[in-house]
Image (cartoon, helix red, strand yellow):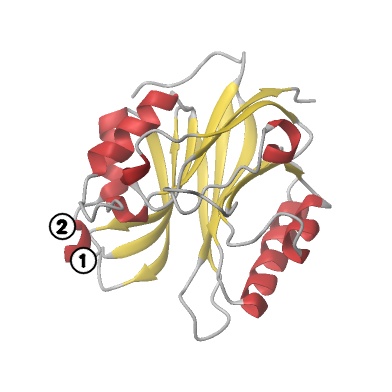
Amino acid sequence: MRRKTSMSYITIMSFNIHHGRGTDGVLNLQRIADLIAACDVDLAVLNEVDRNFSSRSDYIDQIDWLAHYLQMDYAFGPAVHRGENREFGNAVLSRYPIADIQNYRLHYRLVEDRALLDVTCLIDAQPIKLYATHLSLDRITHRRQTSFILNKVKETRLPVMLAGDWNMKPGSSPWCNVTRHLIDSWQEAGEGAGCTYPSYRPRARLDYIFLSPAFRVVQADVVKTLPEASDHLPLVIKVYTHFQ
């Protein structure tokens, strides 16, 4: 397992991988792995990840495959269960040791189940919280999910990274609620609109990485290579740390 030890900067990705099926209709997890590898990320938050879920992804344990291929540690948090070992949800890949994993179901109404994956990573022995999520399109449910997540953020004293497909627009009410507590990395260091969806001709910024002040954003990019790999483009940022 290849782990990161340098404290110079940390590279973080947020990417909705659409269970590895691209806009060309082809199931190809290798393209996802190639994108992650090309960006040389230390932490990756992935949404819409299948674990032996169904025929749509050939019953592959996708996060296990990616972790082995990329030589990274991983955590997985299911949002949907379909019997034993058949799951769909959020995942984290890490070059840092993972000290703890929690998963919270965010199910409030008769809409698609969602979840919050809560991962504690050790960056040179300093624990941090990395939250991975994918929120509902339903406005009422989205508001409740956001409230739950922010309560979790307020409970911890650790530095926080909060990433995923938020299904919200910058400047919206949910976005304002989050940015009262955390920094929007794109607003801090990105250029342009930062749109990530759809991958061809993107016109909506749905994917975000929010940070506590312990992290200073120095670069933020939407990666536009291999747009056929998923219906979303990955968001990648670089941060320096100044832990106290």
The amino acid pointed to by label 1 is Ser
On screen, 23 above or below 218? below
The crowd level at tag 2 (other Cα within 10 Å; few <14, some 14-19, many 20+) is few
Residue 114 x, y percent position in the rendering: 50, 68
Q: Nearer the viewer, residue 148 or 172?
A: 172
What percent of the width, then of the height, locates residue 140?
Answer: 66, 79
Say which element carries label 2.
loop
Depicted 219 relative to depicted 155: above or below = above
Judge left or right: residue 40 versus residue 118: left
Residue closer to the observer: 64 or 239: 239
Disc 1 target residue = 54
Residue 109, position as x, y percentages in the image? 55, 84
From the viewer's perspective, tell me whether residue 186 is left or right of residue 63: right
Given the image, on which type of amino acid does mark 2 rest? Asp
Distance between the Cα atoms at labels 1 and 2? 6 Å
- Judging depth in this view, the residue of 25 and 45 nearest the camera is 25
Q: Position of residue 49 (x, y in %)?
A: 36, 54
Q: Quadrant of the N terminus?
A: top left
For this orientation, the residue located farthest to the bottom is 110
**Which residue does the numbered mark 2 point to in the structure image?**
58
Can residue 64 be seen from the camera position used here? yes
